[in-house]
Amino acid sequence: MGANKGSCVKHRIPTLIIVVAFFLIAGCGGSGSGGGNDGPVIAPSPGTASGRLNIPPGNDLELEPNDSLLQAQTVTTATTVAGRASDPDGGFQLPRGNRVQDLYRLTATEPVRIVLTIAEDDHIANDLDLFLLDSSGAVLQVSEARNTGIELLETAPAGIFLIGVRAFAGASSYTVSFRTLSSLSSDAAVEFFPPGVEIIPSEVVVKRKGKPSTQALNPSAFASKHGLSVTAGNPDDVELMTLDQSEASVEDLQQKRAGVAGVKLKKEGHQTSERNSLRSRTYDAIRRLRLDPDVEYAHSNYRLKARRIPNDSFYPTQWHYKQIALEEAWELTTGSDSIIVAVIDTGVVNHPDLQTRTIAGYDFITDPTVAGDGNGRDQDPTDTGDDANGPGIHSYHGTLVAGTIGAVTNNGVGVAGVTWQTKIMPLRVLGKGGGSSLDLAEAIKYAAGLPNLSGALPPQRAHVINMSLSACAQNPTERAAVEAARSVGIIIVAAAGNNREGEPGCPPGALEFPASYDGVVSVAAVNILQNTAYYSSFGSRIAVAAPGGEIIAGTDVNGDGNPDGVLSTWRNPLNGQNSYAFASGTSMAAPHVAGIVGLMLAVNPRLTPLDLDLLLAGTHQQTTRRITTDLGPPGRDNDVGHGLINAAQAVQAAIEIIGGPPPTASILTVSATQLSFDSMLDTLAFSAVNAGSGALFINSVTDNVPWLTLTPASGNAPLSLRARVDRSLLPTGTHTGRITIASNADQNPSATVDVTVKVSAVGDGNVGTVFVLIVNPQSFTTVAWVETSVGQDYAFAIPAVLPDVYFVIAGTDRDDNGFICEEEDACGLYPDLVTITSGQSTPTINFTVANFVTSPATLQAALAELPGVDSKRLAPLPENGGPLRLQRLR
């Protein structure tokens, strides 16, 4: 309660500093300049700077009174409210005697994430909790973590809810944000908890920078600094860190150190408290790690799921091989025992149709409960079950996938595999409830013969990786593993996903990973009629399609008396007997492609990932042969990519390109295939580089929309490029465009980058008092400042600014500590440097200021994109004994 700031203390200019990525000093009105001289100096006459801040709708202040059912403040799924709660204040009485000081009313039509960010740094003395109530005030969920700056809850799919903020101890300003899960990023490097995946509470994946800003701490000391412990990892690579799941001992110790005495108040103790509090603490741990200048990235660990539509029909009818001309391919080759395909999945069972095809693998499941085999990581990748369809009803998913790639063939029994001789390396990452993203990343590195957290390496690395699994989220640890594997020549194939109709947190068309990472062949599925399967995910990352089948009750398109699925090796979980089963899904489509790549490598062991990319696109310089059959409109489309894979054409093309590209071939690649501008960012950078050898010139950089500006328009690679959006030309909503880079490269001469920009409505938001700072980009000294607010329509004018070049930034100071643009604040940055001319006015410095939802990391990125900003002026700053921060010094 009480959103107004306390008394404001004016800072003397010579002492002003700016702390970035996360803080900027705030003044309290007026203007000034730093420094001084011993003798008289004739100073140039100052200029003026003025403009207006746009505060988008949904950026609101708490409106009092809001402490009863009738007075609850109405919010929407696009609202972030800034408020204040204090323990002595009254509030709405809960059944167990607790009170919530502030109430908000939300009507939701889909699941909503609610994040409470606490402004005060001392979270023991100032402890706020978050409550989710039904419309009558009954408690549905509680997050009441101790000693955390974040409380987090998610609503049911639809309903009218009350959200309560309680000051359990002390007082603090706060922000509380409301966002639909479908609006959140799937990138774990952006969104702390990506939607649509099962977060593993208490686990955080961390990668530290190679060159720390101070003396490097050993893993235990580094983790302890952040209230964590190291479970596994290597400080030179990635580390898995975990929270102490019991908060009581941590709080008791900290209270003793702080000298807190007296009887402790009791938390609510709701049945949801423990789980939600652990999730909130995990979320907060990621937040704190990302503030540490020695951390390259930190993200959540989450479950991946096998992507198969289960069934229980059996019959050895493999229509799917004729659909992709496999018999014709077998006339050219049946494979080679020297080629290895790694199957990263649930492991495999000891099946007679696989025994002679499998080689040694590894079990990468860290959690013994998930593994179900009595231990964690070990050298036995046997599938001990995943309870996918109920207790004891296992999918044996990896066995189905492995059989499609390489079941023993031409032996008179069972089924045939795509390859007859290729070896299969089973790597187990999926168990009971799925598998973790970190375990997947380590398995990818193992398959590629690269160092990994198991400490083991295969006798011979794989040539192909198949991943028939996915999650509607991405993270930098998986991405780095994929990039590392591809860099050593591994061809990576993955199922596109079975999310055509959408699911909670993962709407139709959402990207699924690992299939959507750059460098992965994303495989969609078709049915027996060569139509896109009803479940197959779609989108811009689909590369190719293969048979995935459809199993629909009462449907038998080819009249053979069997389901129209893909037949493969299996084990019946009801009797434990090895058998065969029909299955459908992109999980079954991907191994068709992985097996065909194995056949291609058998005739051309020098085949590279880039060769396959170019062959799929039909742009390989050494052959005009197409290895896909176009099924939809001419050219690539979002349902089947470049078309249905043709095994015979693929093998023939592999033969034709033996010898590889000329040694001086240049190859165009881009650093990013997608750019996303949120409500604060106006500029983003990317680059065009030569992945081959020789010289490469970028002929043109163009776009297909009027609101995008690109610089430069051409140049020699590597070429740094800058994209800037002009939202003034756009209505409210989300807009997309495309950048096309054309070059004189010998291979892959053009590339595209998809652009997404979010536009908020103009201006009826209210974030309270905002401080506008004029800052020297080299010294990071604040040379002038002014206050503005809704009463001034957020217009500002600074009358006396010395001539020079500056950047302009604005933000609130809700905890009144002299710093703007902290996590609880609203913040905005003018997207260009501003030149102040002697005696002249510089008007129309107009830009957007909005509340942060989770982290002000975008501020650091935006500052880094301004030309002329001294990005080297970074130094660690311990604040209140907390994690190191980044400080811009004078």
Image: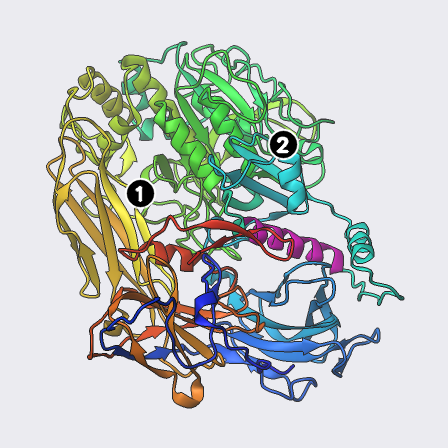
**Pointer 1: what residue?**
640
- Residue at image x 46%, y 53%? 190
Depth check, mark 1 against mark 2: the one in front is: 2
Residue 241: x %, y % from top left: 63, 40
Residue 350 lies, with reference to residue 543, above or below; the image says: above
Q: In 3D space, how far apart are the residues under numbered discs 1 and 2 (Cα atoms)?
A: 40 Å
Which stretch did the figure color magenta?
272-289
Residue 283 falls within the magenta-colored stretch = yes
Residue 14 visible? The answer is yes
Residue 317 falls within the magenta-colored stretch = no
Residue 835 lies, with reference to residue 857, above or below; the image says: below
Please name the predominant secondary structure of the magenta segment in the image. helix
Structure colour scheme:
rainbow
Residue 342: x %, y % from top left: 47, 23
Sequence order check: which comes first, mark 1 or mark 2? 2
- The quadrant in which the C terminus is found is bottom left
* Amino acid beneath label 1: Val
Residue 641: x %, y % from top left: 29, 42
**Pointer 2: what residue?**
232
- Residue at image x 73%, y 59%? 146
Q: Quadrant of residue 223?
A: top right
Question: Which element type, helix, strand or loop, lies under badge 2?
Answer: strand
- Residue at image x 26%, y 13%? 332
- Packing grade of label 1 (10 A; few <14, some 14-19, many >=20) is many
The residue nearer to you, when weighing 51 against 168, is 51
